[in-house]
């Protein structure tokens, strides 16, 4: 005998709180959740130290800072979140305040501006709060800021801020409005009360000399409960504040002195829950003691949440806890079922807990049969647990497989095993062979023959469903029925799973090959192996029938391998039956009917409740509190009080149907993603606040995702949709799928309607709708058809007139044609001659320019580690490069002259000659002085003050020049730029050396000009780039925009380590690919120079 006594009474087997944890392993960008809200639409918004998260029940969408996008979140360290009156989400971060515009999906950020008193007082934002009048308050260090929607600015209200006290980065310094409309602010220096009329603060701080001062200055939680009690959480614990007496009282015995109270929450029972650094705690109002809640389990592993920052009860009743352990979901609907599996010490109650049968006797004791571990008689009230098994010398059951427990009308309790049927003696508390006690000889019929089920008919006959045949004990005689042809009672199979005595004296038999009905006098049998409808059509095999149940109207429910089947007698017939498949795809292991007529079915995937009056199905799994999802055949019982027990592979799950909570929350429905797809591209459309989508030509599919925002079991939420329009369709059931893809568009206007339901089949009352406009191609539009008609009419009218005038026109044209052809021939010859002369002149000018420019080989003879990318727009170029070398220095210039083509070429020839004269004749080596003199010379050359009307030439742009000298001895580069810059890449970092912001030749008539120079020490393997603006100003790309400096710098950073020839090739290929079919807009010149690895 194994006897267990467990103390505890009614709470003896209270189940642990099963929770679901979201962290960095299953969707969150980071485990620590710093704040949490549910918006008016039903979405959850979470703050982390890696960005802002939006949860729709299926996935987390993370918004983070992108330094290159000013419309992204301003900082990833999120401290607080609030929703304003417009539905926009305000996000407080450690470096700025962001507002998420729901209509656009973009962030607008606000920062402190030292010169603007109407800006935020600081960039470190502690808290953001919306009061009952929809005012938006922002807490920054030392200041409460009030936002004005009208002027889009802030009004500052300063409070006492001790500069010698530093705030803790992870502290929560909240803003709170009490029931009287007063604004309270938690700070590092105490509790602040804001007087709105005088716009001043009253400070409550901790003082050792005053016993009623606040306990702890770092105020992190403020809350006024439903009874009017005002609570303040600090770094030292919990305070109760009496506003009339202006006194604080420390509350909460058991709180560690250094355990901060970070959040205060009142549940539906008016119990205060405290979010503390050490975890979640509950305040007992009667004793003012704080109890740490530590019974959180996730997937049977204990969870210890710490660093609680927020507690939220959403609209469906689910409690969410934001903590350093992650986001914790406490679902009240996950405890709808109770169970018997383990005692308080964690030991199995029923050995292996594989339950084969269950029965409740009149005293409330449970008789629990197991697979291979005997029979247990368990008293839930006292915890007494008596085990009968084969190995017990006193409390013995001859076989350990107790597959069925049945009580006869006489009160006898029978246990069917794999090796006989045994009856229980109440006096001796022993089992004996049932047939022997009745003096009935059964031979070896029940030896090694599993008894599946026992039932008693109206005549008192006992029926036994076994693995080998059906057996009936009538009086002192046993009758057996098998699958033997020729017998009066011929069954379709010897394997009998269940037997049911009908209300009219008939007997129903569930076999491995269909269902049988034996007449009340056992003279005939009807075997049903094929399911048909009432018209005798739609036949399909019935399959294995596992369990039976008779309804009050006489119909039989049969759980089969193909689903739940209803069997009814046809009107006007005594022998013919039809079978109606009412629940396909559900293979029931046991059936129980509650007092309201609902069917409860145990399956291998949980428990299903079927309401025959509405046709609704509700499925329950281990997520709802079941001990497991797999239940055993015929392991069920319903007590006289209505409690239903189901035995499974992990114990007994039980419930009373009236106590199974229904999630009545009507889920709000929202679109979460809308995208258009074509063969080559995808276009995403912001889903929030949208009521219309236009589908232009070229797009072949529209994908729409949506979510019923009920988070009980979102994977079980249901959806349906219909598309109303030309050839409107009916509702289409989507099941658990939360997206649709529409293809094969026809032009027209459609309305998509979507409805959703929570996991308990509570549907939205109104559909979510979206207007879809499929735009027809212009040639098929109404305007086009009107134009076609008008054109046709015009053509018909004009055709007659045309024919009349045609002959006269032809004669006139023939005469004119001869004259025109002669003139055209002369003009053609003249144009060809002029074009040839101009082209020859330009080519000759190119030869002159090429002769004056240094060749690539000549350039590399002076600077070997270099490359030149030179792509003139026209035959001749307005860009040129120039090099000169002396004994100690090497001069390099990259010049962009005004214009391109012939004008630019003229400028380049003048520039080359002027540079040669300044450096060789005048022997000037300083780069700034060279450009000063070059600017003066250009200015003088092109000034035409004397004859402005004849030449009209005034140089506006002059020359943009990058001029460098390289000192061979000291490895120093001197640089002067005229409206031109220089890039140096060193160790993966790009150094931009700015030139002067005016061009050569831009001096005024008084000759005032002055260029500056920079001296840059060179390091081995420095990569120097000189260039004109032709590369970055080139249009191209998918949007036809300029290449721009940012893309140019990123390209240089990617290639600067490559060989110089490869760099030149990549630069040329990149700009060619960027141009695509675009025309080159300017001359392109890029020179790259690499300093030697070892300085000479």
Image (spheres, rainbow, N blue to C red):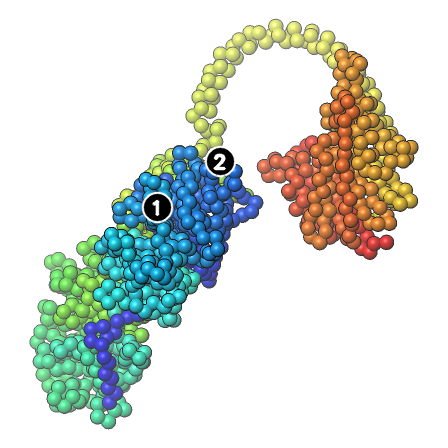
| Whole-percent x, y for residue 343 in the image | 28, 78
Q: Residue at x 24, y 63 (%)?
A: 285
Q: Which residue is mark 2?
A: 697
Q: Which residue is mark 1?
A: 194
With respect to residue 93, does 879 lie above or below? Answer: above
Q: Is residue 622 toward the left or the right of residue 218 in the image? A: left
Q: In the shown orientation, is residue 751 left or right of residue 367?
A: right
Residue at horizontal 52 percent and vertical 41 percent from the top: 114
Report helix, strand or loop for mark 1: strand
Rendered residue at 42%/55% (across/down): 188
Is residue 414 in sight in this rendering? yes
Nearest the camera: 15 or 1092? Answer: 1092
Q: How many marks?
A: 2
**Frontmost residue, 942 versus 660:** 942
Q: What is the CA distance from the residue labelled 2 to the residue labelled 1?
A: 59 Å
User: Tags 2 and 1 in contact by the CB under 8 Å rule?
Assistant: no
Which part of the image, by quadrant, shows the C terminus?
Answer: bottom right
């Amino acid at each position: 005998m194994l006897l267990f006594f467990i103390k505890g009474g009614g709470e003896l087997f209270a189940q642990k709180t099963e929770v679901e944890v979201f962290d960095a392993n299953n969707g969150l960008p980071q485990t620590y959740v710093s704040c949490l809200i549910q918006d008016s639409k039903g979405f959850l918004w979470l703050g982390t130290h890696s960005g802002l998260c939006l949860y729709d029940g299926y996935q987390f969408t993370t918004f983070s800072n992108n330094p290159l996008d000013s419309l992204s979140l301003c900082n990833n360290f999120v401290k607080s979140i609030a929703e304003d009156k417009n539905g926009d989400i305000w996000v407080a971060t450690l470096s700025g305040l962001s507002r998420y515009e729901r209509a656009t999906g973009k962030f607008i950020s606000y920062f402190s501006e030292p010169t603007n008193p109407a800006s935020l007082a600081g960039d470190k934002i502690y808290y953001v709060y919306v009061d009952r009048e929809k005012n938006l308050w922002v807490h920054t260090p030392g200041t409460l800021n009030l936002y004005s929607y009208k002027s889009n600015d802030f009004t500052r209200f300063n409070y006492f801020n001790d500069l010698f006290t530093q705030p803790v980065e992870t502290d929560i310094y909240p803003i709170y409005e009490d029931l009287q409309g007063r604004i309270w602010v938690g700070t590092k220096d105490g509790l602040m009360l804001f007087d709105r009329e005088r716009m001043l603060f009253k400070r409550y701080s901790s003082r050792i000399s005053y016993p009623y001062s606040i306990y702890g200055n770092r105020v992190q939680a403020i809350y006024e409960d439903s009874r009017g009690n005002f609570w303040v959480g600090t770094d030292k614990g919990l305070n109760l504040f009496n506003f009339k007496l202006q006194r604080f009282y420390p509350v909460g015995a058991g709180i560690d002195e250094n355990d901060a109270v970070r959040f205060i929450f009142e549940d539906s029972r008016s119990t205060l829950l405290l979010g503390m650094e050490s975890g979640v705690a509950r305040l007992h109002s009667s004793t003012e003691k704080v109890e740490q809640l530590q019974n959180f389990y996730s997937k049977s592993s204990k969870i210890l949440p710490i660093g609680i920052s927020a507690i939220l009860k959403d609209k469906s009743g689910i409690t969410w806890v934001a903590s350093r352990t992650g986001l914790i979901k406490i679902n009240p609907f996950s405890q709808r079922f109770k169970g018997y599996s383990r005692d308080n010490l964690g030991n199995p109650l029923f050995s292996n807990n594989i339950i084969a049968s269950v029965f409740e006797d009149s005293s409330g004791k449970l008789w629990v049969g197991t697979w291979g571990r005997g029979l247990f008689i368990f008293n839930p009230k006292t915890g007494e647990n008596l085990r009968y098994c084969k190995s017990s010398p006193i409390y013995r059951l001859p076989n350990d497989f107790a597959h069925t427990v049945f009580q006869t009308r006489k009160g006898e309790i029978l246990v069917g095993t794999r090796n006989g049927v045994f009856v229980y003696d109440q006096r001796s508390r022993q089992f004996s062979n049932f047939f022997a006690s009745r003096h009935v000889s059964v031979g070896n019929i029940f030896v090694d023959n599993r008894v599946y089920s026992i039932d008693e008919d109206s005549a008192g006959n006992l029926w036994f469903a076994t693995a080998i045949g059906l057996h009936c004990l009538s009086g002192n005689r046993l009758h057996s029925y098998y699958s033997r042809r020729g017998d009066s009672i011929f069954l379709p199979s010897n394997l009998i799973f269940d037997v049911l005595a009908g209300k009219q004296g008939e007997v129903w038999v569930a076999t491995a090959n269909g269902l049988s009905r034996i007449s009340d006098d056992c003279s005939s049998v009807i075997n049903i192996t094929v399911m048909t409808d009432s018209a005798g059509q739609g036949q399909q095999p019935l399959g294995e029938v596992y369990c039976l149940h008779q309804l009050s109207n006489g119909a039989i429910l049969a759980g089969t391998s193909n689903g739940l089947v209803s069997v009814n007698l046809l009107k006007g017939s005594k022998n013919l039956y039809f079978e109606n498949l009412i629940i396909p795809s559900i293979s029931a292991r046991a059936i129980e009917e509650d007092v309201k007529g609902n069917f409860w079915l145990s399956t291998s995937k949980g428990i299903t409740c079927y309401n025959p009056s509405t046709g609704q199905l509700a499925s329950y799994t281990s997520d709802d509190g079941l001990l497991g999802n797999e239940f055993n055949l015929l392991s069920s019982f319903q007590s006289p009080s209505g409690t239903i027990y189901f035995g499974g592979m992990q114990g007994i799950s039980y419930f009373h149907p009236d106590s199974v909570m229904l999630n009545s929350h009507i889920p709000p429905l929202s679109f979460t993603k809308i995208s258009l797809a074509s063969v080559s591209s995808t276009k995403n459309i912001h889903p929030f606040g949208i009521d219309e989508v236009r589908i232009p030509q070229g797009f072949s599919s529209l994908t729409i995702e949506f979510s019923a925002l009920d988070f009980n079991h979102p994977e079980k939420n249901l959806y349906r949709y219909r598309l109303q329009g030309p050839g409107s369709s009916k509702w289409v059931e989507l099941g658990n799928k939360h997206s649709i893809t529409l293809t094969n568009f026809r032009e027209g206007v459609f309305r998509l309607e979507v409805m959703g339901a929570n996991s308990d089949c509570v549907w939205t009352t109104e559909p979510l709708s979206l207007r879809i406009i499929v735009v027809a191609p212009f040639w098929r539009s109404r305007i086009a058809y009107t134009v076609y008609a008008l054109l046709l009419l015009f053509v018909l009218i004009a055709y007659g007139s045309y024919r009349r005038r045609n002959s006269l026109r032809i004669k006139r044209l023939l005469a004119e044609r001869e004259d025109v052809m002669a003139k055209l021939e002369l003009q053609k010859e003249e144009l060809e001659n002029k074009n040839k002369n101009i082209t020859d002149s330009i080519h000759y000018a190119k030869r002159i320019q090429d002769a004056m420019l240094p060749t690539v080989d000549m350039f590399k003879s002076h600077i070997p580690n270099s490359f030149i990318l030179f792509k003139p727009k026209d035959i001749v170029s307005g860009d040129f490069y120039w090099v000169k070398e002396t004994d100690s220095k090497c001069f390099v210039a990259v010049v962009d002259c005004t214009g391109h083509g012939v004008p630019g070429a003229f400028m380049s020839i003048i520039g080359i000659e002027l540079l040669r004269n300044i450096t060789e004749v005048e022997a000037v080596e300083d780069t700034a002085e060279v450009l000063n003199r070059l600017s003066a010379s250009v200015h003088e050359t092109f000034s035409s003050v004397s004859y402005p009307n004849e030449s009209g030439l005034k140089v506006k742009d002059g020359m943009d020049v990058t001029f460098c000298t390289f000192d061979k001895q000291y490895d120093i580069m001197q640089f002067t730029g005229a409206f031109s810059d220089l890039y140096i890449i060193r160790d993966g970092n790009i150094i931009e050396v700015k030139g002067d912001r005016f061009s050569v030749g831009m001096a005024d008539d008084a000759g005032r000009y002055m260029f500056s120079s920079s001296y840059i020490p060179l390091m081995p393997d420095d990569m120097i780039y000189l260039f004109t603006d032709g590369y970055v100003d080139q249009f191209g790309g998918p949007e036809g925009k300029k290449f721009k400096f940012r893309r140019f710098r990123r390209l240089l950073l990617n290639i600067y380590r490559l060989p110089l020839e490869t760099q030149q090739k990549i630069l040329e290929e990149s700009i060619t690919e960027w141009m695509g079919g675009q025309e080159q807009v300017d001359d392109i010149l890029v020179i790259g120079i690499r300093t030697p690895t070892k300085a000479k």
